[in-house]
């Protein structure tokens, strides 16, 4: 049973650049959520994708955007990177029809903006 | 939106000791999960427990939804239990998961 996978593992970008992070959900899951975790803090919800549409969004600017593909995998895009965007980005998948939204997390992508 | 608090913020134990971690939340929830974040950042599912009690080996959890708290018990702690423990609840209003600030556990040999 394939778990949640994310790529790349680590990434270093320069301020002002754009970045794309990728996530493949756990086998059988159809919903993908993205979180940002700054050092020493709990994860903060960015947005959730279901049926290729953004269903919910947290308190993040429009520089953060995403996409979900027909195979349920997802991308997180961040434009005009700021130093404050340096964080661990976590992807979680769940199965919508259960209504329980029990989430399973990937290993994360650590983004450093210099 | 819903507020989630965890206590204590930090906990240091000797190997073999028992501990109780607490999660308080400000509104009713129909989903609560406990996670263990290892030193490499991986969030590992411990329990999905919107109510009631569950046990898994040396770990157990209890959620009293009507009183808006959940407890995670770790018995006979091992050094591999070290890391940060997070409680996360599903905010029915905002329709998103809200994490607490975590409890950092250090188990000394």
Image (cartoon, grey):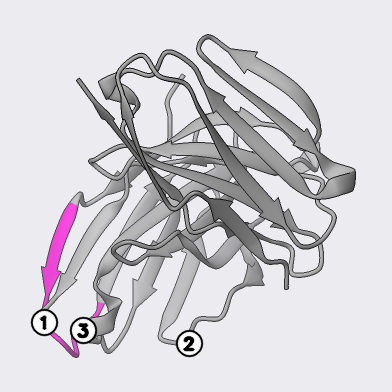
Q: Which mark is residue A61?
A: 2
Q: In which chain is the residue bearing label 2?
A: A
Tell me where residue A4 appears, x and y as whole percent.
Answer: 42, 37
Whether residue A15 appears in magenta in the rendering, the answer is yes
Q: Earlier in the sequence, mark 3 or mark 1?
A: 1
Q: CA distance from mark 3 to mark 1?
A: 8 Å
* In magenta stretch: residue A113: no
Q: Is residue A85 positioned above or below A99 on the image? A: below
Q: Looking at the image, is B49 positioned above or below residue A91?
A: above
Query: Residue A73: in sight, yes or no?
Result: no
The verdict on a common chain for dots 3 and 2 is: yes
Position of residue A77 relative to residue A2, above or below, is below
According to the image, label 1 marks what residue?
Answer: A14
Chain letter belonging to callout 1: A
Please state the total of marks drawn on the protein image: 3
For label 2, count other residues whose C-alpha is less than 10 Å away and answer few (under 14), some (14-19) or many (20+). few
Left or right side of A109 for A44: right
Q: Earlier in the sequence, mark 1 or mark 2?
A: 1
| Point 27% across, 82% down: residue | A84
Kind of element beneath mark 1? loop
Depth order, front residue of A10/B46: B46
Image quadrant assignment for residue A51: bottom right
Q: Residues within 10 Å of mark 3 (few under 14, many from 20)?
A: few
- Could you tell me residue A68's position as x and y percent? 52, 59
Drawn side of residue B89 relative to residue A62, left or right = right
Which callout, 3 or 2, points to the residue nearer the camera? 3
Is disc 3 placed on a helix, strand or loop? helix
Range of residues picked out in magenta: A10-18
Task: Decide: few, some or many residues near mark 1? Use Cα within 10 Å; few <14, some 14-19, many ≥20.
Answer: some
Residue A37 position, x and y percent, is 37, 62
Residue where numbered disc 3 is placed: A83
């Amino acid at each position: 049973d394939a778990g949640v996978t994310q790529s790349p593992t680590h990434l270093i970008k320069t301020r002002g650049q754009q970045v794309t992070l990728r996530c493949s959900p756990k086998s059988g899951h159809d919903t993908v959520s993205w979180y940002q975790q700054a050092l020493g803090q709990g994860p903060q919800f960015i947005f959730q994708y279901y049926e290729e549409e953004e269903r919910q969004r947290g308190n993040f600017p429009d520089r953060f955007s995403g996409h979900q593909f027909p195979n349920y995998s997802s991308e997180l895009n961040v434009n005009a990177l700021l130093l404050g965007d340096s964080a661990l980005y976590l992807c979680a998948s769940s199965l919508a029809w259960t209504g329980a939204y029990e989430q399973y997390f990937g290993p994360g992508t650590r983004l450093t903006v210099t | 939106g819903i507020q989630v608090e965890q206590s204590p913020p930090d906990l240091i134990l000797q190997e073999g000791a028992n501990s109780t971690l607490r999660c308080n939340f400000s509104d009713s929830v129909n989903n609560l999960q406990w996670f263990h974040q290892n030193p490499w950042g991986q969030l590992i599912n411990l329990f999905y427990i919107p109510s009631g009690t569950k046990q898994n080996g040396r770990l157990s959890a209890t959620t009293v939804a009507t009183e808006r708290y959940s407890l995670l018990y770790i018995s006979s702690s091992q050094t591999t239990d070290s890391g940060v423990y997070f409680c996360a609840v599903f905010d029915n209003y905002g329709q998103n998961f809200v994490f607490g600030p975590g409890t950092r556990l250090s188990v000394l040999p």
